[in-house]
Image: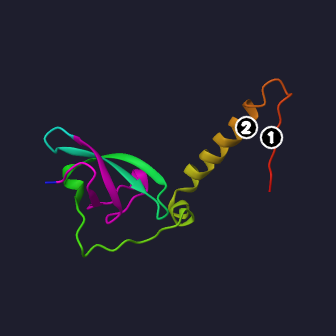
Amino acid sequence: MIKEHERVALSVDLPQYHLKAGDLGVVVMIHGDHDGYELELFSADGQTLDVVTVEARQVRPVTHRDVMRARTLESVVARTPAAAVSLVWALLAFAIVIAQGSGSAFIYFQF
């Protein structure tokens, strides 16, 4: 039985979150009588990528035979439909425009 704070691996792809079977996460909450779980998924450097809700059948405990793998954000974006990427860029541009307010604000980029 999977316990809270235990490492688990996804047993199915979760395309809505851009996650693949085999991706590793940690159980942060158990729903009901182990009907489902809240998982926190991390990047290789320990940054939280997402917290997702999964059904019990969608995860399995990690074993000594599991191997970590790396996928870059660029590879995930490359597989994302162009319309979705365009929408995100459009929303970001819109947010910058409306954040200008009275016109006395400006955006400062430091390189």
Q: Position of residue 41 (x, y in %)?
A: 39, 54
Counting from the top left corner in percent of width and height, residue 54 is at: 28, 48
The answer to whether the residue labelled 2 contacts the one labelled 1, judged by CB atoms less than 8 Å apart, is yes
Decide: is 54 above or below 103.
Answer: below
Nearer the observer, 18 or 45: 45
* Label 2: which secondary element: helix
- Determine whether 8 is above or below 52 in the image: below
* Image: 87 above or below 14: above
Circle on res. 34: none
Query: Which label is found at residue 107?
Result: 1
Q: Earlier in the sequence, mark 2 or mark 1?
A: 2
Q: Badge 1, how many Cα within 10 Å: few under 14, some, many 20+?
A: few
Identified by mark 2, the residue type is Ile
Horizontal side of residue 108 vs 17, given as left or right: right
Q: Residues in magenta?
A: 2-30
Looking at the image, which residue is at 28% across and 72% down? 66
Residue 75 at x, y = what percent?
A: 53, 66
- Residue 39 is covered by the magenta coloring: no
Measure how far apart labels 2 and 1 are at the Cα level.
8 Å
